[in-house]
């Protein structure tokens, strides 16, 4: 018997991709809304409550409204917005986060899909904080460079229209220091303070890399780059979607440049540690539309339903 799935907001970048992935699966029955009724609360409520799993690919306010429409105890909501990522009662949709996270996703009927920048940052920092190698009190900064698809339909159209020379250069943003991913970046790493975070959008479609610089003198005495890499490798041992690369990855050093797009069209995240005797760079890369969005959502659905975690991915 197929699982019934409804994508509320399938017209957006994330919703479209989820819909495409699931449409190819024989174990999924996609519930479809009449385009003329996609803003009809009664019809949306009917489909949300008829679904075994419903994806909310909506702005934050609309996602909160959709969650209130669900009265069925059988419907599992997976929210791709930022609305519920630090809210009590919602499981955080990162199966690799910590021991017991998959059990939480399996049992929960409310799952908040992580943000793309946050996923990369948390994958780097949570194991190191848990291992005591990065003090929770440490002030941390991070920079993320991402393709323009992360900005949704309007930004994609802006870049693809061309004609604006300013779009040919990288563009830092979030300059108010209030980026919407910051609360989850703090909450799900255990850091005492939000990181100082600089996101940068650039003239390529997709791909993302977050870089966290650290001074070894600010870490527990004797901590080395090799220990940081070993802690990441131990935490993610056996994880099919997380690759911890060799210390000071020789291939990257040989090329002289970091390939931000090497995880595109996958649900994989690659983690790197580069360092010397005094400083370290931690880097995580992923496809912002894959492990950073739609791929992560489908992975969470698979975990919740007790299916092969990589089904469709």
Image (spheres, rainbow, N blue to C red):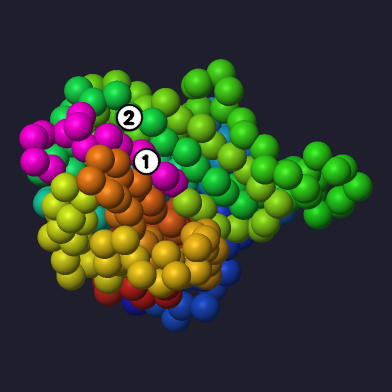
- Quarter of the picture containing the C terminus is bottom left
Q: Earlier in the sequence, mark 1 or mark 2?
A: 2
- Identity of the residue drawn at 46% across and 78% down: 25
Report which residue position mark 2 lands on.
140
Q: Where residue 195 appears, x then y in whole percent?
A: 37, 27
Viewer-side residue, 56 vs 51: 56
Report which residue position mark 1 lands on.
212
- Identity of the residue drawn at 50% across and 63% down: 256
Question: Does the image show residue 50?
Answer: no
With 169 as the anchor, is 44 left or right in this view? Answer: left
Tell me if residue 28 comes above or below residue 128 in the rendering.
below
Q: Write the start and end of the magenta stretch as one range.
A: 210-223
Question: Does the image show residue 173?
Answer: yes
Q: Residue furthest bottom?
A: 26
- Identity of the residue drawn at 51% across and 32% down: 198
Viewer-side residue, 229 vs 186: 229
């Amino acid at each position: 018997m197929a699982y019934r799935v409804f994508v509320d907001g399938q017209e957006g970048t994330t919703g479209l991709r989820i819909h495409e992935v699931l449409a190819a699966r024989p174990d999924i029955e996609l519930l479809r809304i009449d385009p003329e009724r996609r803003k009809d609360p009664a019809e949306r409520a009917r489909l949300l409550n008829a679904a075994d799993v419903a994806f909310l690919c909506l702005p934050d306010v609309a996602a909160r409204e959709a969650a209130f429409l669900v009265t069925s105890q059988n419907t599992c909501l997976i929210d791709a917005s930022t609305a519920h990522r630090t809210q009590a009662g919602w499981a955080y949709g990162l199966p690799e986060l910590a021991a017991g996270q998959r059990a939480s996703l399996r049992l929960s009927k409310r799952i908040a899909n992580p943000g793309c920048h946050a996923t990369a940052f948390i994958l780097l920092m949570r194991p190191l904080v848990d291992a005591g190698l990065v003090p929770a009190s440490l002030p941390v900064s991070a920079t993320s460079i991402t393709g323009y698809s992360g900005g949704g339909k309007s930004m994609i159209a802006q870049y693809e229209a061309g004609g604006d020379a300013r779009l040919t250069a990288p563009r830092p943003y979030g300059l108010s220091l209030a980026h919407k991913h910051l609360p989850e970046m703090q909450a799900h790493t255990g850091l005492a303070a939000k990181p100082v975070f600089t996101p940068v959008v650039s003239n390529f479609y997709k791909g993302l890399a977050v870089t966290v610089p650290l001074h070894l003198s600010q870490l527990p005495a004797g901590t080395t780059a090799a220990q940081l890499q070993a802690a990441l490798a131990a935490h993610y041992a056996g994880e099919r979607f997380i690759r911890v690369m060799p210390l000071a990855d020789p291939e990257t050093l040989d090329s002289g440049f970091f390939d931000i797009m090497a995880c595109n069209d996958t649900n994989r995240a690659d983690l790197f540690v580069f360092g010397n005797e005094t400083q370290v760079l931690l880097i995580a890369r992923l496809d912002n539309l894959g492990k950073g969005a739609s791929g992560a959502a489908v992975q969470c659905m698979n975990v919740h339903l007790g299916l092969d975690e990589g089904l469709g991915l």
